[in-house]
């Protein structure tokens, strides 16, 4: 066969890259919105709160003359601002050379995975997990292995022995999201020390994703891995302004480690992409230098939203739900066989007084196949009243969906 007639096929990596469990239903949502349906977006962690004025002011007030590249590691003002943030928010002194500004927390996750694992190596995660870990691992050709956590046990981490039993000769790191998306679990010093001990005994890195750091409820302590002496030599911390400053679109994150070799690798990855957007770096620095003025009320706000969502869920028959202690997600067990089909139907075929509700099917949040078929994730990112309304609409949708002849015949 001549080269010219060879069929063009994308790479295996490209073909096997999973669809985002969060974005998969977006075309159906766009079509519903185009039909004039008002959608309550409980599918994605995009809060409805306003971005704080210092960030908006710095963006609109940017004075040229040129939007120049920032240094690959990050703008010096932004690096200093992250250090100031860690001192105020976590009581931790982090030297600027242990920090790297990234394009959102997402880029920090990819850099961390690529810095610690080669193609074919494994990273251990806990199921259910933030769905994009699967996509990032696929991009890095890293395999995720998972340990299932038990909702009945509030998604507690397993014993040391169970974690050790899941390690293989290819395991390079353990990845923990704390507070957790999607489970809402909040892990304390005991769990972090347990993972650090395992990591130390088996020569592993620990990746900790703390993008929801401030969102801890029920009087639980906020525990950052930065507070554990010596931890940062084998730990890579992933962070972001997206959730805590309502600045998801600014795309500013941070990667932190005291491990020089890891930071060297991360910096070389960063050099290839040149820089993170300069204006947003400078704009978010304004708030990173004085974070508590904004973040000190966040947990109260989201605990109220959680309670409003839970109160509304209590009225739905046949729906089970988790009670999160942190972050802003609730896992729903729905009385349907296929939560993705139901979520799509809500967008394509259902509306109540011109409104519908969008949730994220949970199957794509499990690394281990065969879980989550009847589950969905609800993000409590809207105000209390709208959340209650969105949940009522979800309940009406469930009733109508399950009353359809095709659903009744299937069950
Ligand atoms: C657990 C977790 N980590 C990282 C991210 C990435 O956030 P961003 O890239 O917006 O900073 C998200 C976004 O939802 C998340 O939920």
Image (tube, rainbow, N blue to C red):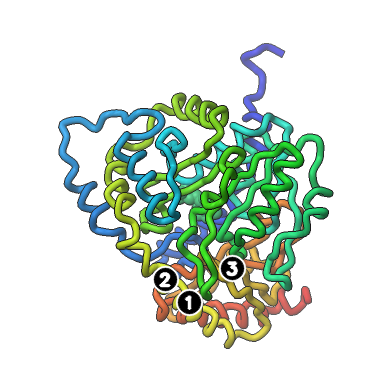
Farthest residue in the bottom direction? 315
Question: For this rendering, which residue is in front, 262 or 307?
Answer: 262
The mark that comes first in sequence, 2 or 1, is 2
Of the pair 213 and 403, the residue shown nearer to us? 213
Cβ of mark 1 under 8 Å from ligand 1: the answer is no
Could you tell me residue 257's position as x and y percent? 52, 38
Kindly indicate whether the residue at mark 3 contacts the one at mark 2 (C-beta within 8 angstroms).
no
Q: CA distance from mark 2 to mark 1?
A: 9 Å
Locate the N terminus by quadrant: top right
Disc 3 marks which residue?
A: 345
Residue for point 53% across, 66% down? 221
Q: Secondary structure at mark 3?
A: helix
Q: Which is in the foreground here, disc 1 or disc 3? A: 1
Q: Is residue 146 above or below residue 203?
A: below
> Which x, y percent locates residue 345?
59, 68
- Relative depth, front residue between 398 and 215: 215
Residue on which disc 2 sits = 382
Cβ atoms under marks 2 and 1 closer than 8 Å: yes
Mark found first going from the N terminus, 2 or 3: 3
- Image mark count: 3
Q: Which one is nearer the viewer's eye here, 124 or 288? A: 288
Pointer 1: what residue?
Answer: 390
Q: Is residue 103 visible?
A: yes
Q: Position of residue 162 (x, y in %)?
A: 81, 55
């Amino acid at each position: 066969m001549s080269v010219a007639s060879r069929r063009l096929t994308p790479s295996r990596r490209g073909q096997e890259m999973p669809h985002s469990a969060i974005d998969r239903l977006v075309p159906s949502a766009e079509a519903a919105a185009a039909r004039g349906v008002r959608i309550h977006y409980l599918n994605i962690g995009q809060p409805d709160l306003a971005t704080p004025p210092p960030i908006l002011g710095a963006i609109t007030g940017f004075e040229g003359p040129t939007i120049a590249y920032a240094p690959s590691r990050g703008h010096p003002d932004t690096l200093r601002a992250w250090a100031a943030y860690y001192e105020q928010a976590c009581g931790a002194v982090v030297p600027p050379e242990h920090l790297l500004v990234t394009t959102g927390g997402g880029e920090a996750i990819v850099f961390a995975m690529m810095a610690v694992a080669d193609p074919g190596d494994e990273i251990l995660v806990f199921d259910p997990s933030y769905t994009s870990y699967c996509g990032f691992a696929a991009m890095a050709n890293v395999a995720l292995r998972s340990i299932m956590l038990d909702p009945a046990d509030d998604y507690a981490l397993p014993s040391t022995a169970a974690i050790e039993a899941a390690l293989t000769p290819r395991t390079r790191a353990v990845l923990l999201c704390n507070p957790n998306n999607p489970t809402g679990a909040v892990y304390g010093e005991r769990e972090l020390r347990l993972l650090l001990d395992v990591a130390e005994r088996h020569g592993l890195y620990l990746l900790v994703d703390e993008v929801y750091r401030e969102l801890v409820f029920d009087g639980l302590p906020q525990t950052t891995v930065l507070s554990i002496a010596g931890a940062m030599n084998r730990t890579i911390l992933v962070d972001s302004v997206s959730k805590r400053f309502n600045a998801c679109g600014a795309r500013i994150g941070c990667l932190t480690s005291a491990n020089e070799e890891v930071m060297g690798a991360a910096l070389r990855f960063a050099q290839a992409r040149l820089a993170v957007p300069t204006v947003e770096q400078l704009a978010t620095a304004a708030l990173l230098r004085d974070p508590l003025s904004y973040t000190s009320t966040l947990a109260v706000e989201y605990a109220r939203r959680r309670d409003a969502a839970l109160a509304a869920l209590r009225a739905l028959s046949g729906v089970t739900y988790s009670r999160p202690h942190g972050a802003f997600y609730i896992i729903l067990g729905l009385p349907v066989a296929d939560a993705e089909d139901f979520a799509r139907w809500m967008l394509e075929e259902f509306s109540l007084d011109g409104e519908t509700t969008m949730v994220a099917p949970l199957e794509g949040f499990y690394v281990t196949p065969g879980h989550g078929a009847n589950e969905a994730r609800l993000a409590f990112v809207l105000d209390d009243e709208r959340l209650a309304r969105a949940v009522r609409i979800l309940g009406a949708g469930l009733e109508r969906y399950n009353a359809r002849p095709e659903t009744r015949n299937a069950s």
